[in-house]
């Protein structure tokens, strides 16, 4: 294994952890909104808001990943 391979794999794992953290934060934000809506007995509660926030985060992350791949020429 070469040093550059080790650095690439370390960068990838950090990048994947950052993506996971962003997804977890989006789900948590959606959960906070959902809990507040359920407390006030409004439609679109916890699960709906978590899924919407998570889906929005996934699409945003995918957009940035695709843009980064196209910009770097990979």
Image: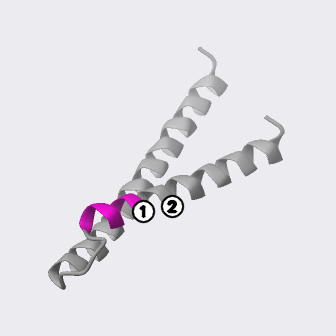
- Report the residue at 27% width, 72% height from top: 34
> In the image, is residue 40 above or below residue 35?
below
> In the image, is residue 5 above or below residue 61?
above
- Report the residue at 44% width, 57% height from top: 22
Q: Do the residues labelled 1 and 2 touch (CB within 8 Å)?
A: yes
- Report the residue at 15% width, 81% height from top: 39
**Residue placed under numbered mark 1 in the picture:** 52
Relative placement, left or right, of 38 versus 5 is left
Q: Where is residue 19 in the image (x, y as percent from the top left)?
A: 48, 50
Residue that protrudes farthest toward the front in the picture? 43
Q: What stretch is highlighted in magenta?
A: 46-53
Q: Mark 1 and mark 2: span between their CA atoms? A: 6 Å
Quadrant the C terminus occupies: top right
Quadrant the N terminus occupies: top right
- Report the residue at 33% width, 63% height from top: 48
> In the image, is residue 34 above or below residue 61?
below
> In the image, is residue 55 above or below residue 9?
below
SS state under label 1 = helix
Relative placement, left or right, of 66 versus 47 is right
**Residue placed under numbered mark 2 in the picture:** 56
């Amino acid at each position: 294994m070469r040093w550059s391979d080790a650095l690439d794999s370390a960068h990838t794992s950090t990048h994947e952890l950052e993506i996971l953290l962003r997804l977890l934060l989006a789900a948590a934000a959606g959960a906070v909104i959902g809990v507040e809506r359920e407390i006030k007995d409004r439609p679109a509660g916890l699960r709906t808001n978590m899924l919407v926030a998570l889906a929005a985060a996934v699409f945003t992350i995918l957009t940035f990943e695709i843009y980064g791949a196209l910009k770097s020429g990979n």
